[in-house]
Amino acid sequence: MSEMLKVKRVVLHSRPGKNGQPAPENFHVEETSLSTDLKHGELLVRTLYLTVDPYMRCRMNEDTGTDYLLPWRLSECIDGGGIGIVESSKSEAFAEGDIVTSFNWRWQSHDVMDGSHLQKIGRLEGCERVVGICGSDQKCQALVSELGFTAAVNYRKGDVHSALKENCPKGVDIYFDNVGGTISDTVISQMNKDGHVILCGQISQYNKDVPYPPPLCDETQEALRSKNITRERFMVLNYMDKHEKGLIQLSDWVKTGKIKVLETIMNGLENMGVAFCSMMTGGNIGKQIVKISD
C-alpha cells in the first residue's frame, strides 16, 4: 500500500471576469492527500519558491485569448513557474537533494512530477542610455542606484512625455514593452526611424476584455508604419531549446555581479493570491516570488 502525504494546494475558487480586478478571494487554499508511490521516472519534490506573473491574469479567464496558454480550471490546482527540491527519486537523471525547476509547477507544498518535465538548475551591450519607466519613486531609485539605469521615470507623477524627452533627447531606439496602453503610445511616439519594439507583455490591459496583443490606436499604428519600426512578440516558450544554456549564463552573470537581482518575497502558500494581486497593482520591486518552504 502506498504512503499518503498530506499537502496544501491553491485552487482557483472563482473568476474575476474579463473586465474585473483579481482579488485574493479568487484563490482558495485546501488540504489534500498525495500518493508517494513513485513510478519509474517520477520524483517527489518539495516546493521551495513559486512565482506570480502578469500573464497569469489571462489564465483566470475561461478563455485566455491565446493558443499557447490554457485557462486555469475552477476548483483545480493552479500552476506556473516554480522551484523545488527532490526528496525522493525513481529517475536516473535526478537524485535526492537536486534543485529542479519547471514552468508548470503546481501551487502545492509537495508534488509528484515526471522527471522529463524538469530542469536542473547591467547596462545593455551597446546602449548609450537605458531609461526605465515604473510606478513609484522607490522603484525609480532602485533602477538607477542598484541596477545602473541611466534614468527612471515615475509614470504616476508628472508628464511622462516630457520626462521621456528630457531623458532620451536623441529619441528611443529600442523599447522593451511590458505595459501597453497610453505609456506605450507615448514611448512609441518618441521612437526613432528603424527602431524596434520588443512586445513582452501588456499588463495595463489584462483586466480588460481585449484580444492579445491589444489593438493600437491609429496614431501609434501610423508611427510604427511611417518610421519603419518593427514590433515583434517575445515569448520565452519559443526559446525552450535555449533555456538550459540561458540559465547557466544568467547564473554566471549573477554570481560575478554583472547582473543584479531585485526580488520581493512573500512567505507562505496561503499568500499566493495576495502576492499575485499585489504584483498586478505594482506592489513589488523586482520579481515577485513566494517562499513556500526552507
Image (tube, rainbow, N blue to C red):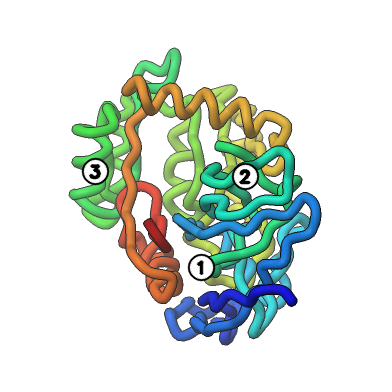
Asked whether residue 235 appears in the rendered view, the answer is: no
- Tag 1 residue: 109
- Name the quarter where the N terminus is drawn: bottom right
- Disc 1 versus disc 3: distance between alpha carbons? 35 Å
For label 1, count other residues whose C-alpha is less than 10 Å away and answer few (under 14), some (14-19) or many (20+). Answer: many
Instruction: Say if mark 2 contacts mark 1, CB within 8 Å.
Output: no
Give the side of residue 133 with respect to residue 140, left or right: right
The relative height of residue 40 versus residue 193 in the rendered view (above or below) is below
- Disc 2 versus disc 1: distance between alpha carbons? 46 Å
Residue 43 in percent (x, y) is at 67, 54
Q: What's the amino acid at mark 1?
A: Ser
Q: Residue at x 72, y 72 (%)?
A: 63
Q: Residue at x 53, y 83 (%)?
A: 31
Q: What's the amino acid at mark 3?
A: Cys
Of circles 2 and 1, which is in front? 1
Residue 161 in percent (x, y) is at 33, 43
Asked whether residue 273 appears in the rendered view, the answer is: yes
Tag shown at residue 140: 3
Q: What's the amino acid at mark 2?
A: Gln
